[in-house]
Image (tube, helix red, strand yellow):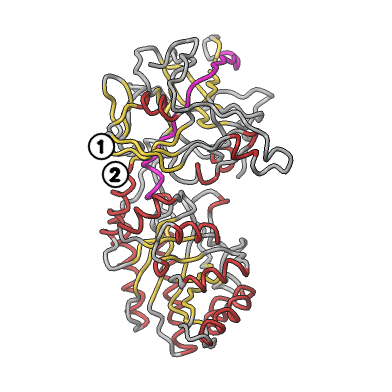
Amino acid sequence: MRAHPAGPLHGGMTPPPSVGLPPADLGALDPQVWPRSAQRVDGELHLGGRPVTELARAHGTPLFVLDEADFRGRAADFAAAFDGADVHYASKAFLCGQVARWIADDGLHLDACSGNELALALAAGFPAERIALHGNNKSLVELQLAVDSGIGHVVLDSFDEIDRLVPMAAARVAAGGAPVPVLIRTTVGIEAHTHEFIATAHEDQKFGFSLATGDALTAAVRVIREPALRLTGLHSHIGSQIFDTAGFEAAAHRVVGLLGQVWQATGEVLGELNLGGGFGIAYLPEEDPVSPDDVARRLRSVVAAECAALDLPVPRLAVEPGRAIAGPGTVTLYEIGTIKPVRLGSGGQGAPQVRNYVSVDGGMSDNIRTALYDASYTCVLANRTSDAPPALCRVVGKHCESGDVLVRDLWLPADVQPGDLLAVAATGAYCWSMASNYNYLLKPPVVAVREGVATEVVRRQTLSDVFALDAVLADVPAPSPAIDQPAPEHPAGARS
């Protein structure tokens, strides 16, 4: 159910929600939530061996700080757990040239959801044969790029798409090339336990061929009969940010059943089965994601059992971990600009209830997920620790929107002040990639840190970049702050 972006309303008053008791340590870094390298040194948050105040001074804020060892370690964890299967990195979670090269070097596959994601991966040197192109409305240009590049799979999503692809594939075959390898995306009718906007396998939505109506089988039979296409297998994806493996197991049961139907209808034994993914990560300490080893064990077991029941060979598996690789290893740094105490009414003993609105120098332009999905995040005071008592806070951005909320409710030390740095955890997936220029704010840079070395992998957008797209302002000089110079001290002097 959708909610008002500012939270539930009761009699015109928005009371503080039930956020539980304050933690014993307001600066604690739960290892389930924070990057593997995160630690406090003399009270200050360090990431990848670098203090956050140094990173903020050198690169400005807002700033995405990516723990390279965390990112690549999680990729390696999935590769090891699914040894013998194909692990696909979700480029839509976060993609840049450096990330594409890491994923290529680490032996993973890559999912592209648009022609531009595909083009970026190819430009970075990612092996085309390890790329799959997704999308419910692939254009002729996107399909032609996929065919010409020789990518590993086009994931077919509609009958219209088959009609578009066949002539291109036939032209390739006529020129001496191989048939285009494709997968059929199957909508298996599983209701994933996640937000309605990121559940993708129930019947009433835009993705895939329905299993229940027979469209999936019809599409598979049609593709098998097209000499310029080669149906290598089936694809299923039930959603994103999922903690319960039961949905994946039920989906595997149904899609293996479709393998059997295809075999009975055509005599073709398909050799690949992509079971999607969308595995959840911990945004809050109380969340408990399933481990790659556990997911792999359960999926292998159910696929083997279902194939044995149908007397089919076990196909080669593929999975798409989604945010589980990119999400946990990145932290967003912000600088506090203003703090506004807002009285909400009286508490049980007549004491006034107060929520501190803590405004930072970014917001929904660099993290739209709280406003869009009611997503939950946690953050800490990053440049120092504090013994001050806890205060109920809401971390908000600087946009002209009441729904511009980053962290809806949390406890921060009561002495947080302008100039302090806040670090929001688990922002590696779907934050930078969904960033916008709303209110003409500029997209932050991404800095990778490892063993004390910080490398900018995506530079900060400048106003000149934005002006260049404006037909009137393209040749007008735009001011650009010298981010690499030490920032002047905030009047409060809190930042060290």
Q: Main secondary structure of the magenta part?
A: strand
Residue 451 - label: 1
Quarter of the image with the C terminus in it:
top left
Rendered residue at 43%/81% (across/down): 260
Specify whether residue 61 is painted magenta.
Answer: no
- Can you give x and y, in whole percent of width and height, for residue 139 in the image? 62, 66
Residue 24 - label: none
Q: Is residue 254 visible?
A: no
Rendered residue at 35%/15% (across/down): 386
Image marks 1 and 2: residues in contact by CB distance under 8 Å: yes
The amino acid marked with disc number 2 is Ala
Magenta stretch: give its range: 324-346
Asked which quadrant contains residue 476, the reply is top right
Local SS, label 1 = loop
> In this orientation, which residue lies closer to the viewer: 177 or 24?
177
Rendered residue at 60%/34% (across/down): 463
Height in image: 481 above or below 263?
Answer: above
Q: Earlier in the sequence, mark 1 or mark 2?
A: 2
